[in-house]
Amino acid sequence: MDSFFSKELCRGLTEQGLAICSFEVIDAEPLQAVAHVKILEGDVLQVSLTHQGYKVELPAMLSYRLITLPKMESKPNKEITQTFETIEDLLRSISPLYVQRHNEMLFEALKQLP
């Protein structure tokens, strides 16, 4: 039986549409769900959802690249792996291409309004 956390993680990632490449829920327990998420940059992240929120385990190469990005230079390592209230906030913090694609999708949706 799927837990609340696995359903919520799956729903949140499904809603991202084309702003991520793919995802797969790899673990679903009563108090936690874990998924592998392939972001647009090509990296595969392990994302977990618990009662505290969303967290990501960064691969070493991605962690190094994020630290060298201008927006991340002044932030200590611990902030990169913080807990986020939404999957969108988590993805925005680690994927510049997610931000770009998400904004493009939003702009296209706004253009469709009467």
Image: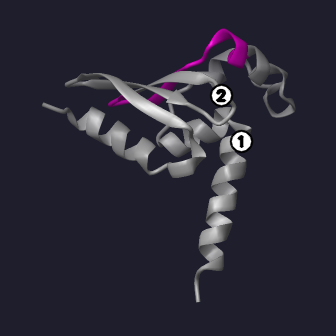
Residue at (56%, 49%) from the top-left corner? 18
Residue at (49%, 40%) from the top-left corner? 87
Quarter residue 33 falls in:
top left
The residue at the far left in this view is 1
Q: Which mark is residue 42?
A: 2
Give the amino acid type for the residue marked by disc 2 in the picture.
Answer: Gly
- Res. 53 visible in picture: no
User: Helix, strand, or loop for circle 2?
Assistant: loop
Q: Position of residue 99 (x, y in %)?
A: 68, 47
Specify start and end residues of the magenta stretch as a single range.
Answer: 49-63
The tag earlier along the polypeptide, 2 or 1, is: 2
Q: Position of residue 49 (x, y in %)?
A: 38, 29
Q: Which mark is residue 97?
A: 1
Q: Give the mark toward the camera: 2 or 1.
A: 2
93 displayed left or right of 56: right
When the figure is inspected, residue 89 is found, relative to residue 106, above or below; the finding is above
Please tell me which residue lies in front, 25 or 64. 25
| Label 2 Cα crowd, 10 Å radius (few <14 / some 14-19 / many 20+) | few
